[in-house]
Amino acid sequence: MDCFVTHLEAAIDGTVLPAGELQTVHQDRPLLVRYDLPAIAASVRPEQLRDRPPTIWRYRELLPIGGDQAVTLGEGCSPLLPCPRLGAEMGIQDLWIKDESQLPTGSFKSRGLAMAISMARRFGVRRVAIPSAGNAGGAAAAYAARAGIEAYVFMPEDTPVINQYECRLAGARAYLVNGLINDCGRIVQQGKPHMNWFDLSTMREPYRVEGKKTMGLELAEQFEWQLPDVILYPTGGGTGMIGMWKAFQELAEIGWLKSPRRPRMVAVQSDGCAPIVRAFEAGLRFAEPVDRPRTIASGIRVPAAIGDFLVLDVLRESGGRGVAVAEGRLAEWNRLAVSREGIPVCPEAAACVGALEMLLAEGWINPRERVVIFNTGAAQKYAEAIACDLPRLDIRAPIDWRSLA
């Protein structure tokens, strides 16, 4: 396969950097991968995808590495599921959930870490480190194990226990830190000269966003190249939001989209940790860090993100917005979605259910619009957040069947 990558571009000021060597950030801000889009348009048409395996690597022309060189666990395209019962409950006719819980490590992090680890191996990296408050650590550990690369994971001590266990199970050197994910990130940065590891932190290398971009490519293909009206996306570091918008821009430039209209992108956060929402509402270019973030949705408990300005750009360019929902109702929305549709919605996606309720009530979303919620991970990985007490039966006593009705 010919690689169509032309260069890397600094998101903060447009500085061009070479793509053929290991890169991290520019002026402590992210780099983006750029492609020869006219050449891609001339070399492949969307109908050619039909004969390719249903994995993220089917979009090889729009990726920095091909599937034959990839570190892969078989990450297939995640299903796009209609949600008529949940939609009817909420008063919307055309509601969908894209269920990322079915990816190999149980979350959308499989996409980004498959790409990042693949590129790290290509550039000869032998040791990586990552801060994680949830699913990224487990995905990094799994893909590093697959690649034969040593992995270090640093997690806040209140990271969900399943995420802690999966890191150790995959052979990573995992540590709990008495601080936030930003404190874990600082440990990773401070350790680089001592440990000679490569930093896999969100947006601190250019390739995780390319993996996350495949969510947008898939969504467009699943809707036959006609994008939905609104996308509700749980937003922490923002890589998925940035990646999807990049995908839509690239698809438009190569002429694959049937309409120039793009979705209104909604960044959903908890009111216990909402730096992006606050910055959007205040009209700021960059977000102010949150001092005491609190939310059971560990994936969006990110008090500061180096890609914050890119997320804010997406919201404004798309005519979207940021929404902070009530932390105290996440469990309620979680039960509602899972009980109506059977999809194992995680607390982060439950926040999107709350945002949908709010935006429908405000009239910002029309009940006839097509709306997609991203379920970014499996509910089963959040044992603490979904814990509940079940009634018990005593086999030594007669069963009162009426009490079960």
Image (spheres, rainbow, N blue to C red):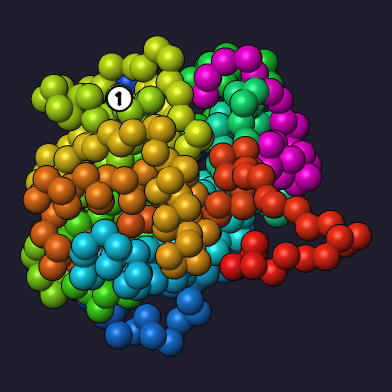
Reply above or below: 377 against 28: below
Image point (69%, 52%), residue name: 391
Coordinates of residue 58 in the picture (x, y in percent):
44, 72
Is residue 180 part of the magenta span, yes or no?
yes
Q: In this view, does 67 lie to the left or right of 32?
A: right
Coordinates of residue 183 in the picture (x, y in percent):
53, 16
Which residue is at the front of the view, 160 or 219?
A: 160
Task: Name the quadrant of the C terminus.
Answer: bottom right
Q: Is residue 5 left or right of residue 341?
A: left
Number of marks in picture: 1
Badge 1 local density, few (<14 within 10 Å), some, or many (20+)?
Answer: many
Is residue 164 part of the magenta span, yes or no?
yes
Reply above or below: 355 against 16: below
Q: Mark 1 points at which residue?
A: 275
Image point (64%, 18%), residue name: 177
Coordinates of residue 253 in the picture (x, y in percent):
16, 63
Reply above or below: 55 against 204: below
Q: Say which quarter of the image contains residue 326.
A: top left
The answer to whether residue 335 shows anywhere in this view is yes
Find numbered disc 1 in the image and state the secondary structure of the residue it sits on: helix
User: What residue span does the magenta drawing correspond to?
Assistant: 161-181
Q: Is residue 261 left or right of residue 331?
A: left
Which residue is at the front of the view, 170 or 87?
A: 87
The answer to whether residue 110 shows anywhere in this view is no
Coordinates of residue 12 in the picture (x, y in percent):
23, 29
Task: Name the quadrant of the N terminus.
Answer: bottom left
Residue type (three-letter) at the residue carrying disc 1: Pro
* Residue placed furthest toward the right: 396
Image point (61%, 60%), residue name: 104
Image point (72%, 30%), residue name: 174
